[in-house]
């Protein structure tokens, strides 16, 4: 299809009552939208949108990259152009309304989806704001999001989401979709990473097992090479020997959880298929058991992992086998659940030298050794939460949430002091709370570790138990300071 | 609620520089530090890491050397 230079953006009102008919009308004009693509979008957007705008011709940088390197070499003619759909939670009867009065529609912008001219798996770059989806319980949903920009008729719209793309089963497979999502999320969020296009990922594959396209699956070794070339420093977690083993390596599972809690997207291989873990949900009503010392990890309250699987609408919930909301049960032979992850790969930044397992070991040793001091703040069992934070975000959140927290009317001078510490770019933080306080988002103690250190060095930057601060082997109690403070919430998009 | 608006915050929040004025030795903390250092110095190899590495090496060889096993491990499900 050649480009039609005079082609207006078209608006389609959609209603839940007329859902199928409205989408059928759109599909007639949106030629590249296949049945598979229609069903995927319908399944995820129902109840969340009232109108769709169709850009009939859109030059997508990701599709054009694949077109230039692959589709253009095929005998069958595939267009270099795509179409794009914009979703709004407000009724739009005429697309011109959005272009003339964009301010009235900005809050109602749910996101966009590029529709590619390929067989079946037509959904290209798609960014949807999960907080605007009716299908998601916002009170219990913690996931990575970042700002993506879109322009409609020259008007600027922003959507906060995690990037999704389907595999075309021709040149790209599930691994490419997942890797592309990670790379695009990171490059959009952090300027240190360069924007990477789908065929770049194919070029970065090693031809050690033959040609890298069309349609070649990957192993975690491929992921590591690609993510390293991209500029990250991937760390591998082997949760099970293979998919037939029922039980996880608990330490590796804890590592996986800590990296998710740190706000890193994690590639999770089911052995045969790969998805990206971008967050989790929590169930505080779960029955949990502390260890012999009375400590337990916050992972004990994890209910589901939030994943992006290219076969489904983004933000699926990967739960236990018996979880009615487990999206993995929709697969057949094999079905997937939270125990299906065999290997995970996390693209860490360079300066997180100290791995999660070592940081956890050090943190737990200190808290178990100082349990008597901890007991003066509150009775156990004690919940530990381990995560990486950047120096800047950690200091900022301390100032924002704690100084005048209002819990006791006292000024939390210890939270202010964090802003006066010289910290490395990244720190490991282990927070500890008596279980009752943890469920209310409150901490009683924390230890902050230098993420660039190794365990032979001076790992601890400071430790706080209640209103006592420990630095460089010295401690001081600040009687006027509150003993409790707010959990650090930022890594998974929390306010 | 912030009830300190308008007050001179410098009077309410002393800087970290005065930490040492009232600080004492953190005995329990330092004891744990000593234990950690001692354990690290005595540890010649990290046994958990060593076991994982052994498994990794075996698997890596299989992926490269055995085409069938390698295929099983590839993530390519449509």
Image: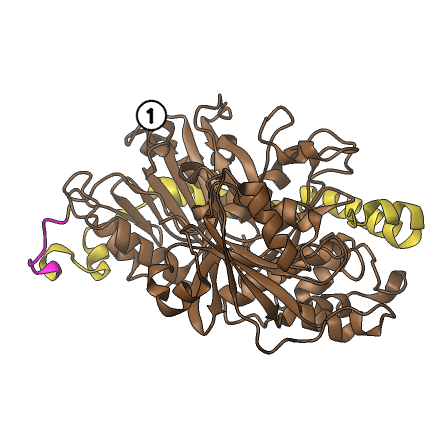
Chain colours: A brown, B yellow
Which percent across, then down, holds residue A227? 67, 63
Residue B5 magenta:
yes
Q: Residue furthest bottom?
A: A5
Residue A70 visible in the current orientation: no
Q: Is residue A343 above or below residue A248?
A: below
Q: Nearer the viewer, residue A406 or A334?
A: A334
Residue A115 visible in the current orientation: yes
Which percent across, then down, holds residue A150? 49, 67
Left-right relation of A137 to A336: left
Q: Quadrant of residue A193?
A: bottom right
Measuring 53% from the left and 63% from the top, which residue is drawn there? Answer: A351
Q: Nearer the viewer, residue A400 or A183?
A: A183
Q: Is residue B64 above or below residue A443?
A: below
Q: Nearer the viewer, residue A38 or A241?
A: A38
Measuring 18% from the left and 42% from the top, which residue is drawn there? Answer: A406
Mark 1 burial class by Cα count in 10 Å: few <14, some 14-19, many 20+: few
Residue A201 magenta:
no
- Count of numbered badges drawn on the protein: 1
Specify the quadrant that holds the N terminus of chain B: top left
Q: Nearer the viewer, residue A43 or A188?
A: A43
Q: Name the chief secondary structure element in magenta.
A: loop
Q: Which residues are magenta?
A: B2-9
Which percent across, then down, holds residue A275? 66, 47
Q: Which residue is mark 1?
A: A379
**SS assignment at label 1:** loop
């Amino acid at each position: 299809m050649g480009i039609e230079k005079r082609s207006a953006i078209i608006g389609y009102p959609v209603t839940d009552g007329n859902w199928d008919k409205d989408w059928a009308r759109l599909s007639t004009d949106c030629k590249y939208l296949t049945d598979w693509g229609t069903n995927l979008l319908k399944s995820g957007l129902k109840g969340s949108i009232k109108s769709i705008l169709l850009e009939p011709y859109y030059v997508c940088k990701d599709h054009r990259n694949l077109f230039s390197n692959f589709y253009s070499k095929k005998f069958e003619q595939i267009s270099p152009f795509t179409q794009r759909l914009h979703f709004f939670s407000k009724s739009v009867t005429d697309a011109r309304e959005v272009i003339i009065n964009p301010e009235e529609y900005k809050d109602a912008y749910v996101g966009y989806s590029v529709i590619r001219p390929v067989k079946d798996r037509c959904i290209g770059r798609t960014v949807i704001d999960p907080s605007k989806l009716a299908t998601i319980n916002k009170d219990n949903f913690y996931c990575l999001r970042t700002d993506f920009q879109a322009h409609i008729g020259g008007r600027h719209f922003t959507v906060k989401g995690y990037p999704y793309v389907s595999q075309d089963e021709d040149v790209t497979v599930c691994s490419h979709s997942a890797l592309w999502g990670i790379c695009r999320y990171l490059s959009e969020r952090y300027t240190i990473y360069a924007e990477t296009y789908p065929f770049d990922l194919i070029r970065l594959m090693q031809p050690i097992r033959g040609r890298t396209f069309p349609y070649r699956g990957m192993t975690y070794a491929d992921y590591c090479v690609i993510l390293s070339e991209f500029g990250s420093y991937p760390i591998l977690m082997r949760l099970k020997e293979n998919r037939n083993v029922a039980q996880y390596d608990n330490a590796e599972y804890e590592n996986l959880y800590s990296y998710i809690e740190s706000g890193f997207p994690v590639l999770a291989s089911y052995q045969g298929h790969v998805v990206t873990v971008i967050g989790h949900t929590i169930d505080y009503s779960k029955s949990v058991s502390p260890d012999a010392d009375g400590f337990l990890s916050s992972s004990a309250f994890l209910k589901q992992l939030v994943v992006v699987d290219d076969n489904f609408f983004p933000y699926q919930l990967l739960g236990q086998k018996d979880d009615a909301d487990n999206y993995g049960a929709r697969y057949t032979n094999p079905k997937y659940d939270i125990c299906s992850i065999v290997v995970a790969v996390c693209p860490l930044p360079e300066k997180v030298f100290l791995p999660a397992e070592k940081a956890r070991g050090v943190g737990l040793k200190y808290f178990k050794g100082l349990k008597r001091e901890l007991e003066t703040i509150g009775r156990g069992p004690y919940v530990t939460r381990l995560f990486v934070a950047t120096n800047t975000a950690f200091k900022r959140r301390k100032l924002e949430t704690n100084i005048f927290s209002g819990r006791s009317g006292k000024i939390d001078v210890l939270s202010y002091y964090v802003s006066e510490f010289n910290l490395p770019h990244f720190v490991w933080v282990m927070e500890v709370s008596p279980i009752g306080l943890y469920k209310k988002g409150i901490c009683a103690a924390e230890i902050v570790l230098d993420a660039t250190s190794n365990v032979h060095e001076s790992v601890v930057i400071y430790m706080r138990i209640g209103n006592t601060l420990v630095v460089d082997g010295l401690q001081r109690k600040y009687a006027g300071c509150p003993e409790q403070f707010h959990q650090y919430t930022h890594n998974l998009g929390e306010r | 609620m912030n009830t300190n608006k308008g007050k001179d915050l410098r009077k309410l929040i002393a800087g970290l520089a005065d930490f040492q004025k009232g600080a004492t030795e953190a005995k329990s903390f330092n004891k744990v530090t000593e234990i950690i250092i001692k354990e690290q110095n005595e540890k010649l190899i990290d046994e958990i890491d060593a076991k994982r590495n052994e498994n990794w090496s075996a698997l890596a060889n299989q992926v490269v050397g055995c085409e069938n096993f390698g295929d099983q491990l590839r993530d390519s499900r449509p």
